[in-house]
Image (tube, helix red, strand yellow):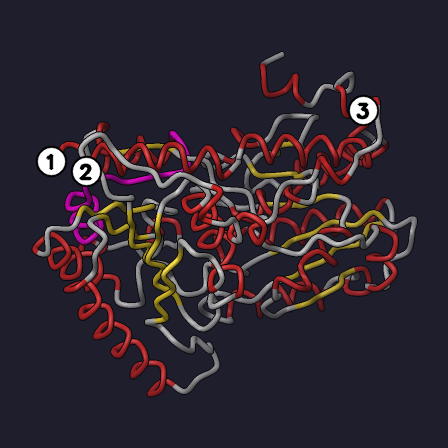
């Protein structure tokens, strides 16, 4: 048994005692509110001033952006946080090491097209002005903006002309390839951004290999970092039974959760087909479909028509809209298992969100997902695009110790995830890269 699996072995220390509040991970709020006087500002041998970094967020990537800010500031880094109204939370505004710069403003997705265009242009203008006078020598890009070509080429050239060290976190190496809308222009702009970046971070070895082979980026310019665990979503004392009651799910129901953006690469149609097979044998299964269609509405319309045409609609709970952080735990605590039927993926934040609640997962064997699943410890893996195999693995799960000993297993999964995907590990690798860049420049 490998080291990771041994941490989840039934004979572990956690199984011999009840989980306590001490075992819970620190929240992003507690990390972000750490006082500067309690920490020594980080410096390099050749840089006597405290290290300052500009963190360029996507404006709405709250779990990752706040987690990164918490990780960096807890190690003594000073951060210029480029955010939006949505990210202007007290945890950031009261942190003495965060200089919150609200360059984006309102990001309401329901605004009229003219309003959206105006605010994007205003953001770019503010960003250009900020960059020209910004004190940080390191610009760390967490997400690009709406106009990818502008960000990947012109903004990158602008940052380099200003003498900035640019670090880029590639959450997807090539989302166009995943979404089946790739083009030569998309690949050219991606290669330009990767090449102009002084260093890139990815979340898996497979992503690193793809960046090297398809975009000819030197291995020395790429680091693999964990996808930091989501500690910003509230996790209250809500019980599983109460969560199920609120959603109209009976105590004896076997509940499956599909959560997140609804898009073709998510493979929801295979889960619907598998769910139909399960109900032919046992009507105790319930399916929660929770999320908002991404891009065209046509994919979800097709899924919805399949549900209507089948005798399964009464066993499905649908919440087809964006779910705010405050409501997220309801669905993860009402579920017995998370289902990830993806057909293509680089990594999945939903998996790590599930782990933060201790929820086991059944995932398709695509991309690096199988590397994030410890068979029979944190979940199961099925053959991608094979609904019958998915149905079989769901049946296997509900007959396994993962389900029978679910309270103990959830504690083990939660503790394992907080160690493997800890923000302290992300900070260690990230800050090391910052210092190397500044040292080489000096």
Camera-nearest label, 1 or 3:
1
Residue under the image location 23 percent in, 53 percent down: 136
Whether pointer 1 and pointer 2 mark residues with C-beta atoms closer than 8 Å, the reply is yes
Q: CA distance from mark 2 to mark 3?
A: 46 Å
Residue 287 position (above or below residue 404): below
Q: Which mark is residue 442?
A: 1
Residue highlighted by disc 2: 438
Q: Nearer the viewer, mark 2 or mark 3?
A: 2
Q: Report, in whole angstroms, how far the alpha carbon at label 1 lies from the one at label 3.
A: 52 Å
Task: Please give the label number shown on residue 155.
Answer: none
Residue 106 or residue 367, whichever sits in front:
106
Q: Which mark sits nearer the N-terminus, 1 or 3?
A: 3
Local SS, label 1? loop
Q: Which residue is mark 3?
A: 15
Residue 313 lies, with reference to residue 338, above or below; the image says below
Give residue 412's position: percent from left, percent from top: 72, 30
């Amino acid at each position: 048994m490998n080291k990771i699996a041994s941490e989840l072995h039934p004979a572990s220390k956690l199984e011999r005692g009840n989980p306590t509040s001490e075992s819970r991970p620190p929240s992003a709020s507690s990390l972000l509110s750490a006082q500067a006087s309690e920490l020594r500002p980080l410096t390099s041998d050749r840089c006597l001033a405290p290290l300052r970094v500009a963190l360029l967020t996507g404006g709405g990537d709250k779990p990752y952006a706040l987690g990164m800010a918490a990780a960096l500031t807890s190690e003594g880094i000073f951060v210029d946080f480029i955010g939006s109204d949505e990210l202007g939370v007290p945890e950031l505004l009261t942190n003495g090491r965060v200089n919150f710069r609200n360059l984006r403003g309102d990001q309401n997705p329901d605004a009229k097209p003219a309003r959206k265009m105006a605010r994007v242009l205003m953001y770019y203008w503010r960003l250009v002005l900020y960059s020209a006078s910004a004190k940080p020598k390191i610009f760390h890009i967490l997400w690009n903006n709406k106009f990818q070509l502008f960000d990947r080429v012109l903004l990158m050239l602008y940052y380099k002309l200003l003498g900035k060290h640019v670090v880029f976190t590639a959450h997807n190496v090539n989302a166009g390839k995943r979404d089946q809308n790739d083009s030569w222009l998309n690949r050219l702009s991606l290669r330009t951004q990767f090449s102009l970046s002084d260093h890139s971070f990815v979340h898996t070895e497979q992503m690193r290999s793809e960046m090297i082979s398809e975009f000819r980026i030197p291995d020395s310019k790429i680091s693999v970092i964990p996808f930091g665990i989501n500690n910003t979503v509230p996790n209250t004392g809500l019980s599983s039974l109460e969560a199920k009651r609120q959603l109209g799910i009976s105590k004896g129901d076997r509940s499956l959760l599909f959560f997140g953006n609804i898009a073709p690469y998510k493979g929801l149609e295979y889960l619907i087909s598998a769910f139909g097979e399960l109900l032919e044998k046992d009507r105790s299964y319930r399916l929660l479909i929770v999320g908002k269609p991404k891009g065209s509405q046509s994919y979800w319309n097709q899924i919805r028509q399949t549900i209507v045409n089948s005798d399964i609609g009464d066993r499905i709970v649908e919440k087809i809209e964006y779910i705010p952080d405050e409501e997220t735990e309801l669905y993860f605590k009402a579920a017995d298992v998370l289902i990830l039927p993806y057909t293509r993926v680089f990594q999945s934040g939903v998996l790590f969100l599930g782990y933060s609640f201790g929820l086991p997962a059944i995932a398709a064997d695509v991309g690096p997902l199988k590397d994030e699943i410890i068979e029979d410890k944190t979940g199961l893996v099925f053959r991608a695009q094979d609904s019958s195999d998915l149905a079989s693995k769901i049946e296997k799960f509900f007959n396994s110790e993962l389900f029978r000993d679910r309270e103990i297993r959830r504690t083990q999964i939660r503790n394992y995830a907080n160690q493997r995907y800890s923000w302290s590990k992300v900070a260690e690798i990230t800050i090391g890269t910052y210092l190397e860049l500044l040292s080489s420049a000096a």
